[in-house]
Image (tube, coloured by chain):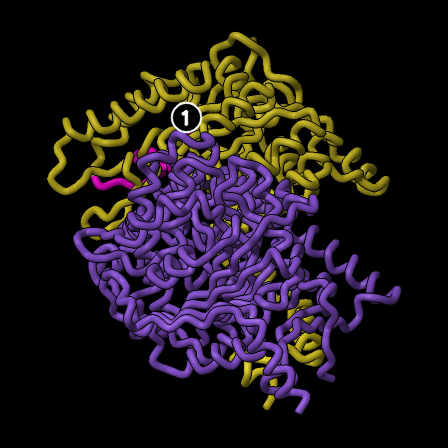
Chain colours: A purple, B yellow
C-alpha cells in the first residue's frame, strides 16, 4: 500500500476520506508526501460528500438560531451581572465576526514571481525528524539556482548532526552549519540569516515538513513592497497519533485559517508568523536581528517565542500576511505533560509580546486593532469574570446562569469544530470540542501561572538552558554546498 | 524500517482514514445530546426551546369540529352586567418551575376557541374598573382573562392566540422582576410592546413583595405578615412604598397608571384569608390598596367561585384558577356560575 504520491497531489485532503502524510520508503531514500484518497471520485462519494456538508451547514445554522435566542437571556442578565453579560456578548461577537470574516480570506495566487529564497532550518536535538524535514526542504518545487537551504545545528547533544551530515552527503547543495555549542534558537536562526543569500529567507522548524509547492506560494505576497513577512498554513503531521494530537490538528487549522486568515485580511496584521513555515524579506529583518537576538524581558533573556517576537518587530513597519496555499506539517506533543509545557511557553511569549504589540497596534487597521486588543483582554479577564459569575450564582442558589454559560460555551465550541469539519472535511472535527474543554478548563488558568512564572524561561519541552552570548568561531563547523561531493556520492551509489 | 519510525510520526493508513470518517459522521448526531439534555432537563433550556418553537411556528387557534360547535351552541351563556374573572399563571409544556401553575398551549388555545364560539366577550381589568365606577357598561357574556406574575412563557404563547381570537387579556406584573427579568419573566421592553399591541392590559402585582418568608413557624406571604422585630409603622412604610414603587414603575415604563391590583398569592390577610400573623395587617394593606387602585383581585375559595356583579367588594374580586381543562370543562364551569348568580348586575 506504500506508494509514492505525486508532487502535484493535493496536500490538504479535500474530502472526508483524503489525508496526506510524509513518508520515507526506506532509510536514506528521499521522502515523499503521500496522498491517501479513498473515495473522492465516483458518484456516490460525491453525493455523500454533498450530503455531509449540507448537514453540517444546517447544523451550524441551527446552533446560530440557538445563540440568537439565548441572546435575550444575556441581555436580561445585564442588570444582575453586567460584567458577565458584557463579557459573554463580547466573546460571542468576537468569535462570530472572526469566523465570518475568515470566509472572505483568499491567498495571493501564483503570479510567477520567483525571487531568490533561502530556507533556514534551525535544529536542536531533532534526530528523529531532521532528515525528513531537510528532504522536504531540498525537494520543494523551486528553480534550483534560486534556492538555498541552510541547516543550523544548535549544539545538539543527540545524533542530529550525524543525520544532517547524511543528508548533506546525498544533497551537497545543502549548507550545514554546526554551532558546536547550544546558543539557543535565536542564535541559530540569526546565523542562518547571516549566511543566507536569498532575497527571501524562509524559516522551517526542524520538526516540520514542507509541501512541494510551499515555497512557490509563500513568496507570492512579497511582490507587494509593503509586505515584510508571510506565513504558511500548518497542519499536524502526527495527527493520527492520539486524541491529543487530533485535538491540536483542529486547533491548528482554526488558528491558521481563522486567526491568521482574518489578521491577514485586515491589512496584513498577522501577529505570529509561526516557525513551521515563515518567510521574511531579508532586507527587512537584517536591521531587526541584533535587538531581537538580545531581547530580554523582566531582566532575563527571552529564549522562546522567537517567531512571534520577530514577527512583531517586522509588523511595526510592514505588513505580515498569511498565505494559506503554502502548506506544511509539523509534529506536535503527544503527551499531556509536554503539551501543557509547550502551551505555557507559548502563553509566556504571548504575554511578553502582547506588552510590545499593544504599544503600537492602535496605529494599525482599526478593526485588526480591535480584534488584537480584544484577544489580549479576553483571556486575561475570562477566569475572573467566569469565576465571579459562578460565585454569584452559587451564592444566590440558582443554577440558571451556569447552564446557560455551559450551553453557550458548548455552542461556540461546536461552531468552532464544525468549521473544521466543513472546511477541512475531516472526520476528526469533534476533537475541537476537546480542545475547547481543555482550553476553558486548564489553558485559561495557565495565563496567570505564566504571569507568575514569567521570569522562568526554560523551554519545558527540551532541556536547553541558554544565555545570550556571541558565537565562538572556533567551535563552528560548516559544510558548504559542494558539487564534487555530490558527484563522488553518485559514484559511490553507482558502485 | 517503516515510515513512522523514520519521520517520528504515526502513519495515516487508508483504514484509519475510513474509520476516522465514520467516527466523524457518527459524532454529528451525538453532539446534539447536550442540547437535548438542556432543553429537556433544565427549566431554562425548556423555556429557550419554547421560545424557539413559538417563533418558528406560533400556536394556532384550533378549528372546532361541527359536533363541538353544536355542543357549544346548545350551551351559549347569556348573562349581562356580570363578568367571569379567570386566572392563569403560565402556559407551556413542562416549563413550569413552581408546580401545577401551567397549562399547555393547546389547552389554552382550545379554551379561547371555545369562549369565542360561545359568543363571549373579553374585557380587561381596566374595563372592569370602569364598570364598577359606573363609567362604562360590561359587554354581554363578559369574561376577563388574567395572568399573574408577568411570566414570559404565558405571554409568548398567549399573545399570538389572543391576536387570532381577537381577544384581550390582563397581565398583573411584578415590577421588580420586569426590571431584572432573566428568562422566566418578561422585561419592560417586551411588556411595552405587548401593551402597545392593544391586546394586553398591564396592571400591578406589587413591586418586590411576591415572595413568602418564614415568620415564626409559618411560611407567609410578605404583604400579609410582619417580620420578627418589625413594628407596625415599619410594616406600613414597607407596604406603602412597595405599592407606590410598583405604580410609578408601571406608569413610567408602560405609560398608563395601573388601576387594578392582584394580591400576591391571592393573600389579603382578613376574613376568609388566614395567611397572616397579625390581624391589624389586613386592614392596613387594604387601605393602601384602596388608596392606589380602584379594584383588586384574589383567588379565594375556588369551590364557591361565581360571576362578579357590581355588588361585589371591589377589593376582593374572586378569580377562577383555570387548570389544564378542555374548552368544554371551562364553558360548563362558567355556565354553572351564571345559573347560580344571585347578586346585583352592573348598570351604567
Mark 1 lies on residue: B204
As rendered, which of A485 and A284 lies closer to the eye? A485
Decide: is B259 above or below B75. Answer: above
The answer to whether any part of residue A85 appears in the image is no
Neighbour tally class for label 1: few under 14, some 14-19, many 20 plus, Cα within 10 Å: many
Of A233 and B172, nearer the camera is: A233
Instruction: Report whether A179 appears left or right of B172.
Output: left
Secondary element under disc 1, as helix, strand or loop, is strand
Q: Where residue A119 appears, x then y in whole percent?
A: 52, 60
- The residue lying toward the viewer, choosing from B293 and A25, is A25
Residue A314 position, x and y percent, is 41, 43
Please indicate whether residue A351 sits to the left or right of residue B56 in the image.
left
**Residue A175 in sight from this viewpoint:** yes
Residue placed at 45% from the left, 55% from the top?
A406
Give the quarter of the figure containing the N terminus of chain B. bottom right
Q: Residue at x 64, y 51 (%)?
A: A60
Q: Quadrant of the C terminus of chain B?
A: top right
Percent across and percent down for residue A74 are 44, 40
Whether residue A1 appears in magenta in the rendering, the answer is no
Question: In the image, is residue B271 part of the stretch drawn in magenta?
Answer: yes
What residue do we see at 45% from left, 72% from top?
A479
Q: Main secondary structure of the magenta part?
A: loop
Residue at the front extreme of this rendering: A484
Residue A371: quarter of image: top left
User: Where B171 falls versus A460 (above or below)?
Assistant: above
Q: Which residues are magenta?
A: B262-277
Question: In this figure, what is the number of numbered marks?
Answer: 1
Please tell me whether residue B329 is drawn above or below residue B86 in the rendered image: below
Read off the chain for label 1. B
Along the horizontal axis of the image, is B140 left or right of A260? right
Residue B296, image quadrant: top left
Determine the residue positioned at 50% across, 65% down: A248
Amino acid at each position: 500500500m506504500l506508494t509514492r504520491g505525486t508532487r502535484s497531489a493535493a496536500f490538504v485532503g479535500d474530502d472526508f476520506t483524503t489525508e496526506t502524510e510524509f513518508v520515507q520508503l526506506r532509510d536514506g531514500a528521499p521522502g515523499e508526501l503521500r496522498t491517501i484518497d479513498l473515495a473522492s471520485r465516483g458518484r456516490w462519494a460525491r453525493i455523500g460528500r454533498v450530503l455531509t456538508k449540507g448537514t453540517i451547514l444546517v447544523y451550524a445554522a441551527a446552533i446560530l438560531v440557538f445563540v440568537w435566542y439565548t441572546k435575550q437571556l444575556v441581555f436580561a442578565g445585564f442588570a444582575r451581572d453586567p460584567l458577565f453579560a458584557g463579557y459573554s456578548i463580547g466573546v460571542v461577537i468576537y468569535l462570530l465576526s472572526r469566523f465570518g470574516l475568515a470566509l472572505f480570506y483568499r491567498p495571493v495566487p501564483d503570479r510567477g514571481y520567483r525571487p531568490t529564497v533561502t530556507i533556514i532550518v534551525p535544529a536542536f536535538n531533532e534526530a528523529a525528524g531532521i532528515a525528513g524535514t531537510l528532504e522536504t526542504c531540498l525537494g520543494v518545487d523551486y528553480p534550483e539556482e534560486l534556492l538555498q537551504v541552510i541547516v543550523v545545528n544548535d549544539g545538539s547533544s543527540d545524533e542530529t548532526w550525524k543525520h544532517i551530515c547524511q543528508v548533506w552527503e546525498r544533497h551537497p547543495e545543502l549548507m550545514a552549519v554546526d554551532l558546536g555549542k547550544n546558543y539557543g534558537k535565536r542564535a541559530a536562526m540569526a546565523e542562518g540569516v547571516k549566511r543566507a543569500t536569498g532575497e527571501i529567507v524562509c524559516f522551517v522548524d526542524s520538526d516540520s515538513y514542507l509541501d512541494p509547492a510551499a515555497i512557490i506560494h509563500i513568496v507570492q505576497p512579497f511582490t507587494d513592497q509593503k509586505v515584510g513577512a508571510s506565513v504558511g498554513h500548518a497542519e499536524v503531521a502526527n495527527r493520527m497519533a492520539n486524541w491529543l494530537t487530533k485535538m491540536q490538528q483542529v486547533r491548528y487549522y482554526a488558528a491558521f485559517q481563522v486567526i491568521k486568515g482574518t489578521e491577514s485580511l485586515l491589512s496584513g496584521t498577522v501577529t505570529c508568523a509561526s516557525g513551521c513555515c515563515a518567510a521574511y524579506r531579508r532586507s527587512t529583518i537584517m536591521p531587526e536581528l541584533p535587538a531581537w537576538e538580545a531581547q530580554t524581558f523582566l531582566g532575563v533573556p527571552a529564549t522562546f517565542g522567537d517567531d512571534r517576537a520577530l514577527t512583531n518587530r517586522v509588523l511595526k513597519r510592514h505588513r505580515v500576511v498569511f498565505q494559506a496555499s503554502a502548506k506544511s506539517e509539523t509534529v506536535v506533543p503527544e503527551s499531556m505533560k509536554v503539551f501543557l509545557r509547550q502551551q505555557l511557553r507559548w502563553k509566556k511569549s504571548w504575554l511578553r509580546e502582547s506588552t510590545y504589540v499593544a504599544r503600537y497596534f492602535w496605529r494599525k487597521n482599526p478593526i485588526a486593532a480591535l480584534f488584537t486588543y480584544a484577544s489580549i483582554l479576553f483571556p486575561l479577564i475570562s477566569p475572573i469574570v467566569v469565576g465571579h459569575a459562578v460565585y454569584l450564582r452559587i451564592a444566590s442558589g440558582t443554577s440558571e446562569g451556569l447552564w446557560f454559560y455551559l450551553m453557550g460555551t458548548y455552542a461556540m465550541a461546536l461552531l468552532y469544530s464544525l468549521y473544521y469539519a466543513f472546511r477541512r472535511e475531516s472526520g476528526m472535527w469533534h476533537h475541537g470540542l476537546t480542545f475547547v474543554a481543555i482550553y476553558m478548563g486548564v489553558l485559561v488558568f495557565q495565563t496567570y501561572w505564566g504571569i507568575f512564572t514569567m521570569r522562568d524561561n526554560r523551554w519545558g519541552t527540551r532541556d536547553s538552558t541558554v544565555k545570550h552570548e556571541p558565537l565562538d568561531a572556533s567551535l563552528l563547523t560548516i559544510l558548504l554546498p559542494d558539487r564534487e561531493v555530490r558527484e563522488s556520492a553518485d559514484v559511490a551509489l553507482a558502485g | 524500517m517503516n515510515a513512522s519510525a523514520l519521520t517520528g510520526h504515526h502513519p495515516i493508513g487508508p483504514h484509519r482514514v475510513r474509520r476516522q470518517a465514520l467516527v466523524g459522521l457518527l459524532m454529528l448526531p451525538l453532539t446534539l445530546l447536550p442540547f437535548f439534555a438542556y432543553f429537556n432537563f433544565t427549566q431554562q433550556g425548556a423555556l429557550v426551546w419554547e421560545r424557539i418553537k413559538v417563533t418558528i411556528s406560533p400556536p394556532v387557534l384550533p378549528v372546532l369540529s361541527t359536533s363541538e360547535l353544536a355542543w357549544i351552541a346548545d350551551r351559549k351563556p347569556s348573562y349581562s352586567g356580570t363578568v367571569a374573572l379567570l386566572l392563569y399563571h403560565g402556559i407551556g409544556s413542562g416549563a413550569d418551575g413552581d408546580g401545577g401553575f401551567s397549562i399547555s398551549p393547546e389547552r389554552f388555545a382550545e379554551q379561547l376557541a371555545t369562549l369565542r364560539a360561545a359568543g363571549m366577550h373579553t374585557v380587561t381589568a381596566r374595563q372592569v374598573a370602569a364598570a364598577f365606577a359606573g363609567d362604562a357598561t360590561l359587554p354581554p357574556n363578559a369574561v376577563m382573562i388574567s395572568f399573574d406574575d408577568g411570566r414570559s412563557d404565558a405571554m409568548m404563547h398567549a399573545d399570538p392566540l389572543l391576536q387570532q381570537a381577537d381577544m384581550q387579556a390582563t397581565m398583573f406584573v411584578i415590577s421588580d422582576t420586569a426590571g431584572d427579568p432573566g428568562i422566566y419573566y418578561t422585561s419592560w421592553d417586551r411588556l411595552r410592546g405587548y401593551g402597545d399591541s392593544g391586546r394586553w392590559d398591564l396592571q400591578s402585582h406589587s413591586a418586590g413583595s411576591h415572595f413568602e418568608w418564614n415568620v415564626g413557624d409559618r411560611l407567609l406571604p410578605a404583604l400579609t405578615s410582619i417580620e420578627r422585630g418589625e413594628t407596625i409603622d415599619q410594616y406600613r412604610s414597607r407596604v406603602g412604598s412597595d405599592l407606590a414603587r410598583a405604580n410609578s414603575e408601571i406608569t413610567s415604563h408602560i405609560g398608563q397608571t395601573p388601576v387594578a391590583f392582584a394580591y400576591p398569592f391571592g393573600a389579603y390577610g382578613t376574613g376568609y384569608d388566614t395567611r397572616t400573623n397579625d390581624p391589624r395587617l389586613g386592614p392596613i394593606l387594604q387601605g393602601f390598596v384602596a388608596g392606589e387602585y380602584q379594584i383588586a383581585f384574589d383567588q379565594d375559595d375556588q369551590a364557591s367561585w361565581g360571576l362578579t356583579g357590581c355588588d361585589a367588594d371591589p377589593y376582593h374580586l374572586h378569580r377562577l384558577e383555570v387548570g389544564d381543562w378542555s374548552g368544554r370543562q371551562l364553558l360548563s364551569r362558567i355556565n354553572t356560575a351564571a345559573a347560580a348568580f344571585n347578586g346585583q348586575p352592573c348598570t351604567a
